[in-house]
Image: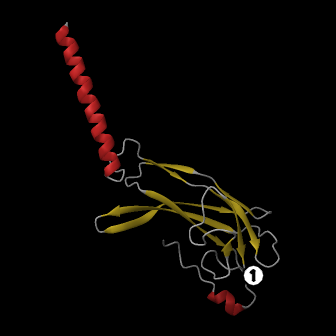
Amino acid sequence: MERRIRKKWKLAVVGGCLFIFFMILGTCSGGVFSPFPCLYLSSFNGKVIDAITKEPIAKAAVLAVYYKSVATVAGSNSFVVDAQETLTDEKGELNISWKMRWFVLCRGDSRGKIIIFKPSYGVFPDHKQAKAVGENKSWPSPNKYIVYELPKLKTIKERKRNVIYGADP
C-alpha cells in the first residue's frame, strides 16, 4: 500500500516538473513550444473622412496586416501572420474585429498596420497629408476608435504620384 502511494507521489512530482519545464521552454523559445499556440489579432475601429470637408468617405478599402516580430541572436525578424480586409459603410465607419489565430509557430509581439485606399484620395499611411487624428501614423493603436483623414487628389499628376507601396513594416 505504502509502495503504491510512493509511486503515485513520484509520478505526480515528475509530471509537475515536466509541466514546469515545458512552460519555461515555451516562454524562453518565443512560444514555439508553447502549450497554447494561439495569437490574438487586434481589432481596428474608426471612421474615414475627407481631410478638407470632414465628410465621411464611403466604400473605402481598409486592409489590416498583422506582423510578428521575434527577437533573435542576429536581430529582430518580422513577417506577416494574417490580413483582414473590409469596406467602410455609408457613414465612413470601419470595423475590423479581433481574431484568434491558432498554431502560430512563432510568438512574440503582435502588431497590426492599417492601409486605407479610395480612388481619388491619398492612401493612408503613405500619402504625406493622410493622418490618423491624434495617433502615430505608421502604427495606429489597435482597439481604439480613430478618425482617419484622407486628402482629396485634385489633379492627374497628384493621382499618378499616389502609389501604394505595400504593407512592409
Q: Which residue occupies the foreground of this view, 64 or 70?
A: 70
Q: Quadrant of the N terminus?
A: top left
162 to the left or right of 5: right
- x 33%, y 46%: residue: 26
> Furthest-front residue in view?
134
> Measured along the vertical axis of the image, is residue 1 above or below residue 44?
above
Residue 49 horizontal/vertical position (percent) = 76, 71
- x 38%, y 61%: residue: 70
**Label 1 SS:** loop
Q: Quadrant of residue 56?
A: bottom right
Q: Which residue occupies the foreground of this view, 31 or 155?
A: 31
The amino acid type of the residue labelled 1 equals Lys
> Measured along the vertical axis of the image, is residue 32 above or below residue 7?
below
> Furthest-left residue in view?
3
Q: Which residue occupies the foreground of this view, 168 or 20?
A: 20
| Count of numbered marks | 1
Label 1: which residue? 152
> Measured along the vertical axis of the image, is residue 160 above or below residue 8?
below
Residue 33 horizontal/vertical position (percent) = 32, 47
- x 37%, y 67%: residue: 76
36 to the left or right of 84: left
- x 52%, y 72%: residue: 167
Residue 144 horizontal/vertical position (percent) = 65, 57
> Furthest-top residue in view?
1
